[in-house]
Amino acid sequence: MASSFQTLSHSTTTQRTPIRFSQINQSPPKNPLISFPVKASNFPLRFPAISISKSSFNFTPKSALMAKSEKGYSNVDIFDSEEQVAFELAKFTANLSDHFVSERGAFTVVVSGGSLIKSLRKLAEPPYSDSIDWTKWHVFWVDERVVPKDHPDSNYKLAYDGFLSKVPIPPGNVYAINDSLSAEGAADDYETGLKQLVKTNILATSPTSGFPKFDVMLLGMGPDGHVASLFPGHPLLKESQRWVTSINDSPKPPPERITFTFPVINSSANIALVVCGSGKAAVVKAALSGDQSSDMLPVQMVSPEGELKWFLDKEAAAML
Ligand code: 6PG
């Protein structure tokens, strides 16, 4: 069945007619950037039934391998400020863009919602705004709240306001959910859309896992250690077949979301975990401690086939 996976019409300097998906003519959201208002205490752990111990996990989590040496943690970069994190993240992403555009003629980028989007702002500023070949970018969401695209909770709206509206990515290369469907329907639809992109070679596939292999995922982490919409103790942590699935009981509101699954996340060529602020310091320490005694946090299950790199500001790294 064809996907109604939606590509977007937003004002960019480069326009082209999308050929793969139906296009919606939605006006760009009019409201200014609205950041997510929920505090950590608003989404307590609600799913104690599923526990994933490190020994039962079927691959070696890279985060747990990052033993602290005298020089610090490998693959963990700590910067003085969020401003510097944003600058280094832009440099990292621009370098990957150059690499994948010359290697395969496309660059597939997955973003999360949350504060990550604000930290992408330097990509939309010189020198990166001018040097990146935006026409080759394909943008996806690792998770999305099932709300209209102009709703303040929409991860699409967050990214549109914060970043996408400022760079000339072809609208047909921005893959938003079909917000007229239920969470389950939107997840199925998004998965179907990804499968179409694999067929056209826009999206690579991992020869090892058979799941799609995105060039980079830029992910935030919640104060409870969640990534995407994969929450501590939730049964979805064990999903092993689906590419994209739905959740109707997200402890972080809104409750209805779609999310990539761990097999897809972990087939990535690169993942950046971008974490700033003192509110994340305890979970950063827990994630990087390599402690084998407790159940794994979702962030500890992030273990890409390629590279995993943490970008922390000094507040988030304060307990390391
Ligand atoms: C979402 C996000 C989520 C987010 C983390 C971190 O839709 O809720 O994709 O996974 O990245 O909650 O968000 P903050 O950086 O804002 O804490």
Image: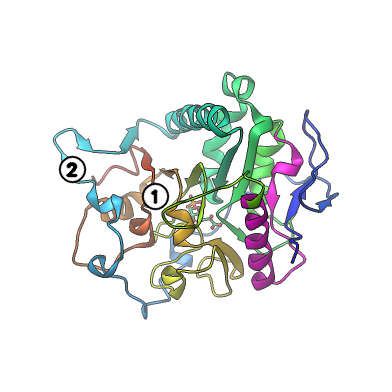
- Quadrant of the image for the N terminus? bottom right
Task: Assess disc 1: are there few (<14), some (14-19) or many (≥20) residues with their C-alpha within 10 Å of its C-alpha.
Answer: many
The residue range painted magenta reads: 169-198
**Extreme residue toward the right, this view:** 25
Q: Amino acid at mark 2?
A: Lys
- Where is 215 relative to 284, above or below? above
Left-right relation of 171 to 49: right
Image quadrant containing the C terminus: top left
N-term mark: 2 or 1: 2
Q: Is 251 rendered above or below residue 226?
A: below
Question: Residue 6 lies in what quarter of the image?
Answer: bottom right
Left or right: 2 in relation to 247: right
- Residue 304 is marked as 1
Residue 154 part of the magenta segment:
no
**Residue lying furthest bottom in this view?**
49
Residue appearing at x 52%, y 46% in the figure: 214
Res. 153 visible in picture: no
The residue identified by callout 2 is 68
**Of the residues shown, which amino acid type is indicated by label 1?**
Pro
